[in-house]
Amino acid sequence: MKFVYDFTEGNKDLKDLLGGKGANLAEMTNLGLPVPPGFTITTEACKTYLDSGEEPTELRDEVSAHLDALEQKMGKKLGQADDPLLVSVRSGAKFSMPGMMDTVLNIGLSDKSVTGLAKQSGDDRFAWDSYRRLIQMFGKTVLGVDGDLFEEALEKAKEAKKVTVDTDLEAADLKKLVTKFKKIVKTEAGRDFPQDPREQMDLAIRSVFESWNTDRAKLYRRQERIPGDLGTAVNICSMVFGNLGPDSGTGVAFTRDPASGHQGVYGDYLQNAQGEDVVAGIRNTVPLADLEQIDKKSYDQLMQIMETLETHYKDLCDIEFTIERGQLWMLQTRVGKRTAGAAFRIATQLVDQGLIDEAEALQRVNGAQLAQLMFPRFDESAKVEQLGRGIAASPGAAVGKAVFDSYTAIKWSRSGEKVILIRRETNPDDLDGMIAAEGILTSRGGKTSHAAVVARGMGKTCVCGAEDLEVDTKRRRMTVGSTVVEEGDVVSIDGSTGKVYLGEVPVVPSPVVEYFEGRMHAGADDADELVAAVHRIMAYADRVRRLRVRANADNAEDALRARRFGAQGIGLCRTEHMFLGERREMVERLILADADDEREDALKQLLPLQKRDFVELFEAMDGLPVTVRLLDPPLHEFLPDITELSVRVALAESRKDANENDLRLLQAVHRLHEQNPMLGLRGVRLGLVIPGLFTMQVRAIAEAAAERKNAKGDPRAEIMIPLVGTVQELEIVREEAEQVIAEVIESTGVDLKLALGTMIELPRAALTADQIAEAAEFFSFGTNDLTQTVWGFSRDDVEASFFTAYLEKGIFGVSPFETIDKDGVGKLVKDAVKAGRATRPDLKLGVCGEHGGDPESVHFFHEVGLDYVSCSPFRIPVARLEAGRAAS
Ligand code: PEP
Ligand code: MG
């Protein structure tokens, strides 16, 4: 196996092997763009190291051969005393993990070669500054020395000199600092800073491999659902310097605005600085457009390269570049992250430019982005105090209490508080706090700062670089002019406009929701543009998708909304929701009935009410299928709480005025009390033990359908039996239902066709799907209960109990109640689909658990051949989009 690739040997499609950075450096090299020469060590080498604790045996020789070739190309040797070749050693995984893994620059500098570098560059200060950076970075990342020790020494050096910025330190100061840094290394790491350049390189490579498994990298991967076994590649690249004076610099650029998608010049530039300074947001940058004044030649060349890249990649690219004494170098490019709104706009813009087709446009957006666009926004007309304005880095409207460190963010959010994490700038150590916060606000750094990049990746609201804010982390407060915001004060941040407010700002619905609701008003151009893009993408998705999308809805209002959102029917009407409020007492009477006539009386009372509900629902969904599920939950849910009632009765008894009804009620509550109600008297079991309950519901459905037909409507009711475990249960209920339907046809004279089917939500039902299909015209997979029973996890308790531990231990990356567990629950679904269809080829198949609206699960349901997914009304656009993406 080959473990090392020269930049001239790879290409952009080798991301698995060369990582994103390595693959794209190779692609740019082959496009003839100015990339400093170098080579990439593959992810396979990393995996071998992580598995065995040792580099593959061939690696050393391969690296030597590539280093020789590089030295020949550059005409100098690594660390050569009179004119050293210096290299950077950078991590680069398949998926971008900004700031999560190690990078070491200036490898090759030593006590000897630093003077050679000084001579060659004609700049003593530069050489010593580069050397101190190497020791600092190497000490921190490779040798594990606390980075603050170097920072403190640097601060002290500046104080001693009475200067505030690094660039005011002179060569002599930096030389002293190097001695100081070396001492720190010796004391803290227990070894000297290595003077042998090859040893520096080898140790740095190993440390990059190891950085794949740091806690923060693991946490990031879990958040972003990046598999943990990919490993990282390592890029060895000859150094170019942005810190060689005012005609040098470094910057980042986007080929379009990652927030709006608009074409133009977007990016940040920092004169006389080295790579990491920009991303870390340490010094404030100037807008990229200013580069035209600073260095017109490089600016023009950069614009040209950006156009080449966008046309080549057919997408928004982001770029890192360095200018070394007027010579432009490309250090990195990749398809850039973008906000949800920009994703939709860019996809349609690229279609219009003829760069991509509609099928590709669908792959450029996703359901999570659409869901984000459906969030409410701040009401601009509200009277609130604007504190300041920063850069709109990641959209959304976030309100919460101000906190100034990650620890507090985590602590407060665990106790249920919403918090906004406010920092001068964030670094990878803030990741936990960023996850815990509603939003992130920083006073320094641009659109490409750590805070901005990570927040965008997480879909979290972020405003960065709000320079008017003076953040004082030590005193836990910030000041803006004369206003002081203390820890715990409420602030609101708008990641779409960059505005920061004091207090809680009211929110208004998103224009995308207004559009789906059919209420989109012309006005804000920006919103119109977004809505137009969403409209087009949804039309593509609807054109290509095979899966139909239905709604889980149980009243006319939700049904109508679902219809506006594009629902093609109701996949689940939970009739228990019709027995709330004052009707609860009727159910109570039904449960308490000792005699048949009492029970029949209660049922008779419920019948017309149920019928009315169904008439309204069938009217709202006229012409579309409506699956009505017969009563499912354990009966005790309709009765008072056992403890409260016991106390009430006991108190009444002690006063000697206990009432007869309460006593009966308490008896019933005791009788029906179950240790495991979810595995108890519920679903089809209710229909089998409570005479008349299911038949009353079937009668109400049939009579409602007849009424709608008489009114020239087109009702398409389907009757669904929950929690079936064996075909015998279904057969009994089915026979009774058919009889009632026949009676209604007879009495109304209206011809009715009501499909009868079942939910598949118990493992036994899935395993005997071939038999169950004999008695069912359709299956709807109840993946909530199926997940509960397959895993043996209580769906009501699990999130609050051991789930966090499971997520932290990486047992799963996401809750199986959120995204379908393909290997377990999914396997049952897949097999049941096959078995069911083998018995009944025209069996209709759907899913109505929460997974029906989850993007990843929708793709799975498409693959296993379901006919439809059913989800809550607000998820319908997401399901439509993902069904389209799955099919295209
Ligand atoms: C299910 O179990 O997936 C389902 C849809 O039913 P419910 O959530 O009502 O139990
Ligand atoms: Mg269920």
Image: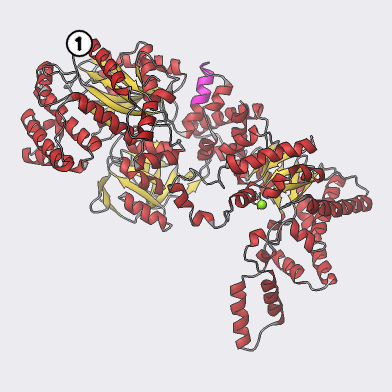
Task: Decide: few, some or many residues near mark 1? Use Cα within 10 Å; few <14, some 14-19, many ≥20.
Answer: few
- Which of the two residues, 549 or 759, is positioned nearer the viewer here? 759
Q: Is residue 549 visible?
A: no
Q: In the image, is residue 348 part of the stretch drawn in magenta?
A: yes
The quadrant in which the C terminus is found is top right
Q: Is residue 613 left or right of residue 88?
A: right
Locate residue 632: give its quadrant. Answer: bottom right
- Residue beneath disc 1: 75
Locate residue 663: give its quadrant. Answer: bottom right
Under circle 1, the secondary element is: loop
Q: Specify the color scheme.
A: secondary structure
Q: Is residue 142 left or right of residue 53?
A: left
Q: Magenta stretch: dominant SS?
A: helix
Give the vertical position of 383 relative to 220 (above or below).
below
Q: Is residue 662 left or right of residue 86?
A: right
Q: Is residue 435 left or right of residue 83?
A: right
What kind of residue is marked 1?
A: Gly
Locate residue 767: give its quadrant. Answer: top right
Q: In the image, is residue 802 part of the stretch drawn in magenta?
A: no
Q: Position of residue 350 (x, y in %)?
A: 50, 20
Give the vertical position of 417 relative to 8 (above or below).
below
Q: Is residue 174 visible?
A: yes
Q: Position of residue 481 (x, y in %)?
A: 25, 47
Magenta segment, which residues?
Answer: 346-355
Q: Position of residue 387 (x, y in %)?
A: 33, 46
